[in-house]
Image (cartoon, rainbow, N blue to C red):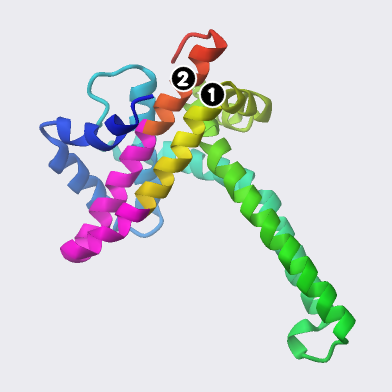
Amino acid sequence: MDFGMAFGFVFQDKDWLRKVLIAALVSLIPIIGQLVVLGWGLSVTRRVMARDPQPLPDLDFGNDLARGFQAFVIGIVYSLPIILISVMFGLFGSLLGVDSGRVSDAVRVLYTLLSVCFGLFSLVYAIFMALALPAAYANFLAKGSLGAGLAFGEVFRLVRAAPGAYLLVLLGQFIVGLIAPLGSILCFIGVFLTYVYGLAVMGHLYGQAYNQAVENLGLATA
């Protein structure tokens, strides 16, 4: 993987500012805009998977919206365990009456221990999702099927085939998380520019990781 290329490829496109600015403006649309730019970022992934020498795409509202919505569904499915456990934990706390303050010390200690366990589980699961979702998105793009993103065996196989590549994706997510707030320096629209830039960076890393995984598995890339 070329980690640095993911952060620099955007600026190699002569029309990069126009493409990023349009995506940033679309991202201002509530909900729909977020799905569109998610799909736009994944179109970067698809181009990298196809070894396209110009991986930064123009925004295609309809197709990007459809792609982004499917990716959103994939993300929700992978998030279900943590969502369900959060709901159950909240209900458990309500049944115990923890918020009322009218509970015994033993119950309070039990709830505290469960809270710590839940927190640790949430951390581990967040790391798992950060590794699995990029592979799920790429498998979905490669097969052109929502079901491919939910084919857990295939997804885990990709991650196992290139753990180093997917750890670099995780590192990239951390760095992008540091870059995104810098947009506030450029006032309101700057936040959205750095947000969209971050999606492009991550899209590039997703594509690289997938190509590395299928290469290690001896399969043809998309």
Q: In the image shown, does 44 or 128 lie closer to the viewer?
A: 128
What kind of residue is marked 2? Gln
Q: Is residue 58 visible?
A: no
- Where residue 62 sits: x, y (%)? 34, 38
- Position of the C terminus, as image quadrant, is top left
Q: Are marks 1 and 2 in contact (CB under 8 Å)?
A: yes
Query: Who's the residue at 73% across and 85% down the image?
Result: 99
Tell me the magenta residue range: 178-204
Q: What is the residue that sits farthest to the left in this orientation?
A: 14
What kind of residue is marked 1? Ala
Classify residue 188 as left or right of residue 77: left
- Where residue 129 sits: x, y (%)? 58, 43
Residue at the disc numbered 2: 212
Mark 1 Cα-neighbour bin, 10 Å: few <14, some 14–19, many ≥20:
some
Determine the CA span between mark 1 and mark 2.
Answer: 6 Å
- Where residue 100 sits: x, y (%)? 76, 89
Helix, strand or loop at mark 2: helix
Q: Is residue 38 visible?
A: yes
Helix, strand or loop at mark 1: loop
- Position of the N terminus, as image quadrant, is top left
